[in-house]
Image (tube, rainbow, N blue to C red):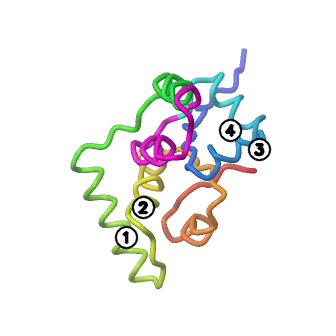
Amino acid sequence: MWTWSYRVSALIIDTSSWIAYLGDGQHAEVIEEALTEGRVYLPPVVAAELTSGNLGKREMNELVFFLQDLALCHTPLEHWLRVGNLRVKLRGMGETISTPDAHVAQCALDLGGELLSEDHVFERIAEPASLRLAAR
């Protein structure tokens, strides 16, 4: 009997999409499906950005509890060297990207996954960086 086999890819969610999701439920179907399937990975910088928001103690505790349940992107020195190389490559093509954005993109690249973001910088760099963006 023939069966289809496919690998469900990791989903990296940028800070902008987490804020939209947590605020008014944007992309709820995509994010909740990925959460259920256990394929959401958290870049460390996204955790830092989310927890640096102006939240009350209760909301912060709930956010931290939620984030602790996500798989963290593995970011050894080699990852950060690839982040720097990505920035250099893109700069050579006329695109400037911040280190945090390059880190998020590199997490998706390292995992062979998709990136969900509201930030249009990722649309500009998707093709030259071979970055796959999640359908919104």
- What residue is shown with label 2? 102
Give the residue displayed 65% in from the left and 31% down from the top. 34
Element assignment for label 2: helix
Residue 56 rendering spot, x and y as whole percentages: 56, 34
- Which region is colored magenta? 41-59
Q: Which mark is residue 22?
A: 4
Alpha carbon distance from label 2 to label 1: 7 Å
Alpha carbon distance from label 3 to label 2: 23 Å
Q: Check residue 43 for magenta coloring.
A: yes
Q: Quadrant of residue 76?
A: top left
Give the residue displayed 46% in from the left and 46% down from the top. 52
Q: Amino acid at mark 3?
A: Gln
Sequence order check: which comes first, mark 3 or mark 1? 3
- What residue is shown with label 3? 26
Q: Amino acid at mark 2?
A: Ala
Sequence order check: which comes first, mark 2 or mark 1? 1
Q: Are marks 2 and 1 in contact (CB under 8 Å)?
A: yes
Q: Which mark is residue 34?
A: none
Looking at the image, which is closer to me, 53 or 26? Answer: 53
Quadrant for the N terminus, please. top right
Give the residue displayed 73% in from the left and 37% down from the top. 30
Q: Amino acid at mark 4?
A: Leu
- What residue is shown with label 1? 87
Alpha carbon distance from label 2 to label 4: 23 Å
Above/below status of 119 relative to 110: below
Q: Quadrant of residue 124?
A: bottom right
Sequence order check: which comes first, mark 1 or mark 4? 4
Q: Nearer the viewer, mark 1 or mark 4?
A: 4
Q: Quadrant of residue 91?
A: bottom left
